[in-house]
Image (tube, grey):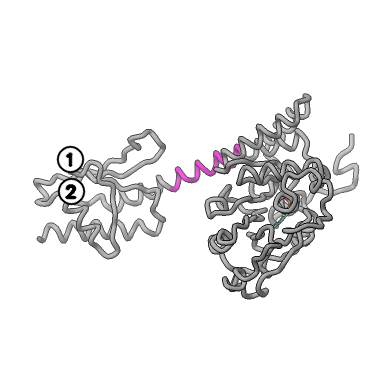
Amino acid sequence: MVSYETLGVPRVINASGMMTHLGGAVLSPPVAAAMSRASAHHVDMDLLKERAGEQIARWAGAEAAWITTGAAAGVALMTAACVAGSNPRRIAQLPHADWQPRAILVQAGHLIHFGAPIPQMIRLGGGEPRPVGWVNLSPAEVLDAAFDETVAAVLFVQSHHCVQKGMLPLPEVVRIARRHGVPVLVDAAAEPELGAPLRAGADLVAYSGGKAFGGPTSGFVCGNASLVAACRAQERGIGRAMKVGKETIMGLMAALEDYVARARGEQTEAMQRRVDAMQAGLRELPYTRLTVERDEAGRPIPRLALHLDEQQLGFSAAALVQRLADGNPPVMVRTHRVNLGIIALDPRPLADEDVPVLVRAVQDAYAGLRRA
Ligand SMILES: *Cc1c(COP(=O)(O)O)cnc(C)c1O
């Protein structure tokens, strides 16, 4: 039976990263099984692509999503969506767009070669790459001045390949582009934070499925529903050269499902770690009982509650809350049950390094109030 061995292609021990030239990700057994299961039957591909896109959109917190062969295809399709929209005549004519707007602004430090040139992926979608600023400096006013009626979109590339200093951060690019009513596209190929650029205001984001998410060679775009629909419309044009099969779709879905579950697990772990650290730090507080409580609404959030014996302490929980808020730095706590002598500490908004500062502030507030 044919194998890597019979082809004379030796196995590689890869300690370098998720590299396309080494085959992207090694698939976990559930991902491989999902691909194998998907290969066994026929399905309505339009329906599968639609439903899979809807599920990815829910995971990413996006209005819509569309599966692609990779992030490079994502850049081409996002560009095509902004240049040709859903217009069938224009879609058929790509990549030779002879209309405006078709310029895609890119900060000069983002014009990378990721294995192929970013500007070429833009051209593949009918766009005309237009560099902004310089390789080491991208001033806001230069980006602002680059907008005119020929500009179809701005592409922001989030990658370790990019020049990391002197470039405008995504929220700033979004702010400027918004003023000109132009969409912001993000190439987040290898980024692990699903949907983060959308929360920063981007309109469309392209990811690789086979990098951070551990899926098969694949990718997806997500974001604004009408722009995603325009990406999908390219199936009748350049998108056909980027066709994904049912096995790839189900492999990507299995990888993302696992990724989302793991990300949730890590959050839970981080919350518990902070609660444990607060509890250890505040164990010695006088006349105060510590309990770890579940969220009132049933969400999986542990919180540390301080039950004050106000009589013995000689001050109220409300006074403690006030003293913490007036401190330097100000410390804000949950006060839902302050009238019962209880305050609670929420681990979600805290950074790990906030915990010792918070512990110290509570200890100081107790000491100050008891002296008063
Ligand atoms: C890897 C990469 C791409 C290409 O992604 P594929 O999923 O391989 O098509 C595009 N842009 C950046 C920044 C990348 O790192």
Is the distance from the Cβ of mark 2 to the nearest ligand 1 atom less than 8 Å? Answer: no
**Along the line of sight, the residue nearer the viewer: 313 or 83:** 83
Does residue 271 appear anywhere in the picture?
A: yes
Q: Position of residue 349 (x, y in %)?
A: 39, 51
Which label was assigned to residue 340?
Answer: 1
| Most common secondary structure along the magenta stretch | helix
- Residue 327: x and y in percent read 24, 62
Q: For this rendering, which residue is in front, 210 or 52? A: 52
Q: Is residue 35 magenta?
A: no
Mark 1 and mark 2 lie on one chain; the one further toward the N terminus is 2
> How far across and down, in percent of the image, does residue 144 sit?
59, 69
Q: Quadrant of ligand 1?
A: bottom right
State which region is magenta: 257-270
The residue that mark 2 highlights is: 317
Q: Is residue 361 toward the left or the right of residue 90 in the image?
A: left
Q: Secondary structure at mark 1?
A: helix
Q: In the rendered image, which quarter is residue 35 located in?
A: top right
Q: On residue 206, which mark appears? A: none
Crowd rating for badge 1 (residues with CA inside 10 Å; few <14, some 14–19, many 20+): some
Task: Tell me, yes or no, whether the two marked residues, 1 and 2, touch with CB atoms within 8 Å.
Answer: yes
Locate residue 6 relative to residue 254 in the image: left or right.
Answer: right
The quadrant the N terminus occupies is top right
Give the amino acid at mark 1: Leu
Establish if 361 lies above or below 134.
Answer: above
Regarding mark 2 in the picture, which secondary structure is present there?
helix
Q: Is residue 13 visible?
A: no
Nearer to me, 347 or 278: 347
- Real-space Cα distance between discs 1 and 2? 8 Å
Amino acid type, label 2: Ala
Establish whether ligand 1 lies closer than 8 Å to the Cβ of label 1: no
Q: Is residue 71 above or below residue 108?
A: above
